[in-house]
C-alpha cells in the first residue's frame, strides 16, 4: 500500500477537470508510479514546481527523507487547456513550470506556495491556478472527453471510435496525440490498466483472473503481459502496491 501518499477529492467546481488533489511524504525510499493518462502539477518541499507529463511506462523516483509534496492531477485530455501546448510535448518528461509558462509565472507561483502556511493552503493555491488557466485558455476538447468516456467505461474498440465521434482515423489520432500525448491504442491500454487497479482496490477478495476479465482483458495471461510491458512487474505485485 502507498502509505506515503494520500488523495483527496477535487474541489466541486473543478471536478470535471481534476482527477484529484494529493499530498505525499516521500520518506527517502524509491517509489514507482504507473501511467494513468493524466498530467500532474506539483510542488516539492524546497520550492521545486514540476509538470509531470503523460507517461507511457512506469517510472521510479526518490527524494530526500521526509520530503513533503502536494499536487493536482488533471484528467486525461485536459492538458492542452491548462498548458497552452500539446500534451505530446511533455510526453514521458518531468519539467519545471518555468520551461512551460516562463520565469515570471514560475516565480510568482513559487512565492505563493512558499507563503502558504500548510499543505491544504498550498493545494488551494494550485487549484486557483487551475481555475485561472482553464478560464483563460480554450475549453477542453470535447472529442477528447468523449474518447475517455468510451474507453474508460464502455470499452469501445479503438477502431469504432473514429466513426462514433465523426472523424477520420487520422484526424482522431492527431486530436488524441494533442490531448493525451499519444494515440488511442496506448490510451486504451493505460485506461484498462487503471481499471484493473481500481477494481483491485475496491474488491480485495477477487482473484486475478476475475479482475482481469472485469477490467477488460481477454484473460489473466493478457493482464500479465500488459502489466509486464507497462510497469515491468507482475499483476500480483502491482495489486499489492495499489
Image (cartoon, rainbow, N blue to C red):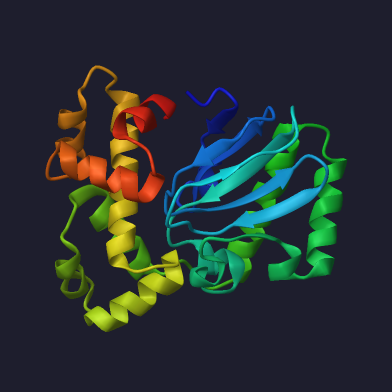
Residue at (55%, 22%) from the top-left corner?
Answer: 3
Q: Quadrant of the C terminus?
A: top left
Q: Where does residue 93 sit, x and y in percent of width and height? A: 58, 61
> Which of the 4 quarters of the picture holds residue 159?
bottom left
Q: Where does residue 189 sit, x and y in percent of width and height? A: 29, 54
Residue at (85%, 43%) from the top-left corner?
Answer: 114
Q: Where does residue 88 sit, x and y in percent of width and height? A: 49, 71
Residue at (75%, 34%) from the top-left corner?
Answer: 64
Residue at (43%, 28%) from the top-left corner?
Answer: 241
> Which of the 4 quarters of the picture holds residue 236?
top left
**As displayed, is residue 211 above or below residue 190?**
above
**As displayed, is residue 229 above or below residue 182?**
above
Is residue 62 shown left or right of residue 17?
right
The residue at the far left in this view is 218
Is residue 239 shown left or right of residue 132?
left
Q: Nearer the viewer, residue 125 or 231?
A: 231
Label tally: 0
Amino acid at each position: 500500500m502507498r502509505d506515503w501518499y494520500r488523495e483527496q477529492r477535487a474541489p466541486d467546481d473543478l471536478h470535471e477537470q481534476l482527477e484529484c488533489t494529493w499530498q505525499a511524504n516521500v520518506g527517502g525510499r524509491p517509489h514507482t508510479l504507473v501511467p494513468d493518462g493524466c498530467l500532474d502539477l506539483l510542488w516539492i518541499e524546497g520550492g521545486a514546481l514540476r509538470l509531470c507529463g503523460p507517461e507511457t511506462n512506469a517510472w521510479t523516483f526518490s527524494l530526500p527523507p521526509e520530503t513533503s509534496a502536494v499536487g493536482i492531477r488533471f484528467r486525461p485530455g485536459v492538458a492542452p487547456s491548462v498548458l497552452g501546448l500539446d500534451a505530446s510535448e511533455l510526453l514521458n518528461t518531468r519539467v519545471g513550470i518555468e520551461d512551460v509558462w516562463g520565469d515570471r509565472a514560475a516565480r510568482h507561483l513559487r512565492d505563493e506556495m512558499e507563503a502558504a502556511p500548510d499543505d491544504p493552503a498550498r493545494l488551494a493555491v494550485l487549484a486557483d491556478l487551475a481555475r485561472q488557466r482553464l478560464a483563460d485558455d480554450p475549453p477542453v476538447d470535447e472529442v477528447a472527453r468523449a474518447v475517455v468516456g468510451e474507453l474508460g467505461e464502455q470499452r469501445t474498440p479503438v477502431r469504432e471510435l473514429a466513426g462514433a465521434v465523426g472523424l477520420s482515423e487520422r484526424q482522431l489520432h492527431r486530436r488524441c496525440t494533442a490531448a493525451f500525448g499519444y494515440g488511442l491504442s496506448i490510451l486504451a491500454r493505460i485506461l484498462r490498466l487503471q481499471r484493473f487497479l481500481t477494481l483491485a482496490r475496491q474488491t480485495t477478495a477477487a482473484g486475478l483472473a476475475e479482475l482481469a476479465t472485469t477490467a477488460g482483458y481477454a484473460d489473466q495471461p493478457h493482464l500479465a503481459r500488459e502489466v509486464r510491458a507497462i510497469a515491468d512487474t507482475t499483476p500480483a505485485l502491482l495489486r499489492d502496491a495499489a
